[in-house]
Image: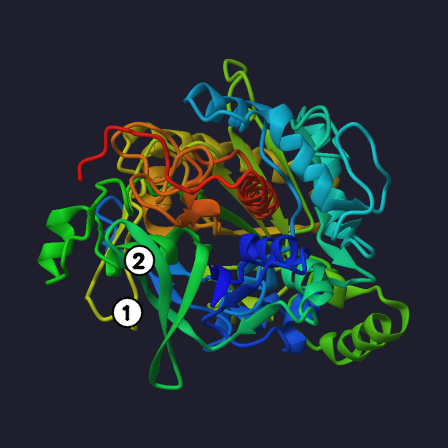
Amino acid sequence: MYDYIIAGAGSAGCVLANRLSADPDIRVCLIEAGPPDKSPFIHTPVGILALMRSKTLNWGYYTAPQPHMYDRQLFWPRGKTLGGSSSTNAMIYTRGHRWDYDHWAELGNRGWGYEDMLRYFRKAEHREAGGSDYHGTGGPLNVARLRSPNPISLAFVEAGVQAGYPRNDDFSGPEQEGVGLYEVTHKNGKRWSAAQAYLREAEQRPNLDIITNALVTRVLLNGKRVEGVEFLRDGTRQVVRASAEVILSGGAINSPQVLLLSGIGPGEELQRHGLEVKHELKGVGRNLQDHLDVLVVQRCTKPVTYGFGLDSLYRGPKGIYDFFVKKQGMFTTNGAEAGGFIRSSPDEPIPDLQFHLTAMCLDNHGLNTRLLFQHGYSLHVCELRPKSRGYISLNSADPTQAAHIQPNYLEAPEDLEKMVKAVKIARNVLAQPALKEYCGDEVFPGKQVQSDDEIREFVRRKADTIYHPVGTCKMGNDDMAVVDDRLRVHGLEGLRVVDASIMPTLVGGNTNAPTIAIGEKGAEMILEDRKRGSDTVPPAVAVAQ
C-alpha cells in the first residue's frame, strides 16, 4: 500500500515523485509506460533526430484525419520513457506570457496568476546566467545558454532585428517580445530532462518505487473514491493501491484516455465502447489545443548547417570529439537554437506568433530524409493562441490501443488567416541582409506560392504540430471542467490530474517549463492538504452525477 501513486513519469510526474518522496514518511509509487531513460540519444542533444523515429522511446501517435487540412493524419511524437517528452523534446526553456496565467486566474482559478506561478518557475530553476526577480538559482532544472550556436542561428537573430523586432536575450524575463537565442534545459552540454533534474536525486530513496514498462489501464473506483490503479506489465495485469491519492500525470493524451477507460467521462462516449459509466464528467478529453506550425525552408549556399554531405566525413568525428571531450560543438545543438515572439500586427497587444529556427532542411519532423542530405535552414512559425478546439476520445476499450486524437486544426477560419500572415512574416525575416550570404532557393512554400490563396493551400497541405498539446482535463468550475483549482477531479475523492492537460488555455510558448511548474505547484498543494488533514473531495460544483 502506497500513500500516493503517480501514473506517468513525464515532466510533471518526475517533479511529483521527487517532492512527495522527500518526506521519508510518505510512500510513493511512480509508474511509467516506457523504459528507463538510458539511451545515449536522450542525453546527446542532437539525438532528437533519432528519437523521432524510435519505436520504444516515442509513442508515435497519429491524429485522426484533419477535415480542414485535406484529411491528413499528422504525426504526433510524445516521449515514452522516464522524463516523458522532456527526454525527447528540443529542450527549449520558455514559459509563455504573463497574460496567459493572469487569464487562468480571471477564469476563476485561484492561485494561478502570473505572480503566483513565477514562484514555482523560480523554485524549479537553476539558471546558469544567474538569478533575478524572474529567475531562480539552486533549483533542480538546469537552464543554460547554448554552448555552440550555429552561424545560421546567429544570422537569424540579426535578420530579425533588421526586420524590426527587438533583440531579446531572455524570453522568460520582464518582456517576452523579440528575437534571440533560446535558453535550454542542458547541463554540461547534455540534455537535462525532468528525469535528470528530479528523479536522479530521488530514485534511491527507500520510500519511492519506480515501475517502468508498465501501462496504466484504469484507476480503481470504490463508489466515488479512487483507491488505486491497474496496470499492464509483461502481459500481466497488476494492481497497486493508494491510501491517499492517485495522481494522473500522463499528459494531454494519456490522462484523459485513462479516465475514459476507468468509466469517468462523457456517458455517451463511454457507452459507445461498452464501458460502464461510473462517473459522468463531460469535459474529459475535450478542449484539446495545440500550436499549429508551418515551415519556410531555404537552401543554404554555404556548408555551415547540419545537413548530411561529404563534409560530414570530417564534421562528424570532430563533433564527437568536441562533445565528449570539450562538452561543446554540433552535438550539443537542441535543433532549434534561435527564435522569438512577435506580433502579427501592431494591433496585437502581446506576441501572437513564435519562431523556431532550425539549421537543417526539414520536412515532416525530419522524417523526410531526402531533405536532410543537403544544406539548408528551416524557419518554423506558429500561432500562439489558436481558436480551434479538438478532443481526445477512445478508438477502443482496449487500453493498449492509442486514443483517438482530433485536434481540429484550422476549424476556426481566423486561425488560417493568422497562418497566412505568419508565412509572409517568416519570408520577410529570411530575406533580410544578415542572411543574404547564406540564402539559396526556397524549398517551401516555393517561389511559385505567392498569393493569399496559394499560401492558404500551402498551410493546409504542409502545416503540422510543434508538439504542445494541452487542455483535455481542464481546470475550472464550469460544466466542462475536469479538475478544480487544486487539481482534484470534480466529484471524486482521491484523484488528481497534474500535467499539461489541466491548462484551461494554451500558453504562448513552449509547454515544458510550464508543465514542470504545474508539477511543483501540484506537489505543494498535495502536501498542504496532507498536512492539514483535509480529504481530497472538491467543493460542490455543478457536475452531473
> What residue is drawn where x is 86% and y is 39%?
130
How are the residues colored?
Answer: rainbow
Give the secondary structure at mark 2. Answer: helix
Discs 1, 2 touching: Cβ within 8 Å: yes
> What residue is drawn where x is 35% and y is 46%?
493
Q: Which of 60 and 32 is in front in this view?
A: 32
Residue 192 spot, x, y in % from top left: 71, 60
Q: Which of 15 and 286 is in front in this view?
A: 15
Characterize the local packing of mark 1: few (<14), some (14-19) or many (20 or more) Cα atoms within 10 angstroms: some
Q: How far apart are marks 1 and 2 (CA)?
A: 8 Å
Upstream in sequence: badge 1 or badge 2: 2
Residue 70 spot, x, y in % from top left: 24, 51
Q: Which amino acid does label 2 sit on?
A: Gln
Q: Which of 353 and 388 is in front in this view?
A: 388
> What residue is drawn where x is 54% and y is 57%?
13
Q: What residue type is labelled 1?
A: Pro
Residue 270 spot, x, y in % from top left: 15, 55
Q: Name the residue under label 1.
A: 399
* Image position of 269 (left or right of 233): left
Residue lying at the far top of the rendered structure: 347
Q: Mark 2 points at which residue?
A: 257
Placement of the C terminus among the 4 image quadrants? top left
Asked whether the viewer can see residue 180, the reply is no
Residue lying at the far front of the rendered structure: 533
